[in-house]
Image (spheres, grey):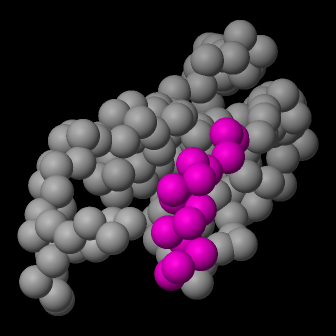
């Protein structure tokens, strides 16, 4: 499971106020988890907030060939976006995914070198050159943080905590 850690002084202060109050925070944590899940959905819809780097020309060419371009970044199949789950308890709210490839999309990195072998035919063809297999050196994947909150998201969470602390939050 990959999770993003919230590093916001404003939200941390509000959560500290909550901790000190010694209340059962389950209701507000459930609201916060929902707010974070909606923020992640916005990230996928907007292709990042701020905008993610575009796809490499080779990736676009491959997606055109597959019939999945034009389309959205990180949403060729929709599996990553639909794998997002929110969880909460009395002391925490988290949003994450258990997909193996999520971390490299969130953080960026380089894939391992590997061999690509012909599957259906007896050879691979690249620009008139035929090979049974080729060595791929790996790909550099830029970070496209989908588990991220923007300033408005943080303010919404702060407001939820303050409403809860002042008894003005309608409990779900």
On screen, residue 88 versus residue 146, left or right, reads left
Left or right, 134 with respect to 33, comes to left
Residue in the picture at 66% in, 22% down: 15
**Is 95 within the magenta?**
no
Left/right placement of residue 72 relative to residue 19 reads right
Q: Nearer the viewer, residue 38 or 171?
A: 38
The boundaries of the magenta stretch are 52-66
Q: Percent x, y for residue 64?
A: 59, 75
Q: How many marks?
A: 0
Relative image position of residue 114 (x, y in whole percent): 15, 49
The answer to which quarter of the image holds residue 93 is top right
Residue 44 picture quarter:
bottom right
Asked whether 8 or 142 is in front, the reply is: 142
Q: Is residue 45 left or right of residue 101?
A: right
Q: Is residue 127 visible?
A: yes
As drawn, 123 above or below 144: below
Quarter containing the C terminus: bottom right
| Residue found 69% across the figure and 17% down from its top | 8
| Residue pictured at 84% horizontal, 47% vertical | 169
Residue found 16% across the figure and 49% down from its top: 135
Whether the magenta-drawn stretch holds residue 53 is answered as: yes
Q: Position of residue 41 (x, y in %)?
A: 69, 58
Query: Magenta residues: mostly which secondary structure?
Result: helix
């Amino acid at each position: 499971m990959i999770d993003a850690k919230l590093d916001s002084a404003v939200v941390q202060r509000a959560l500290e106020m909550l901790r000190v109050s010694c209340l059962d925070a389950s209701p507000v944590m459930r609201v916060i988890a929902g707010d974070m899940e909606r923020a992640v959905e916005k990230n996928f819809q907007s292709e990042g907030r701020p905008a993610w780097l575009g796809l490499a020309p080779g990736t676009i060419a491959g997606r055109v060939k597959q019939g999945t371009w034009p389309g959205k970044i990180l949403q060729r199949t929709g599996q990553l976006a639909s794998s997002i789950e929110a969880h909460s308890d009395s002391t925490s709210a988290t949003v994450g995914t258990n997909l193996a490839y999520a971390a490299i999309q969130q953080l960026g990195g380089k894939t391992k070198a590997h061999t690509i072998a012909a599957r259906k035919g007896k050879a691979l063809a690249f620009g008139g050159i035929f090979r049974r297999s080729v060595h791929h050196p790996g790909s550099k994947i830029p970070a496209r943080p989908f588990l991220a909150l923007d300033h408005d998201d943080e303010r919404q969470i702060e407001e939820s905590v303050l409403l809860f602390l002042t008894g003005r939050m309608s409990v779900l």
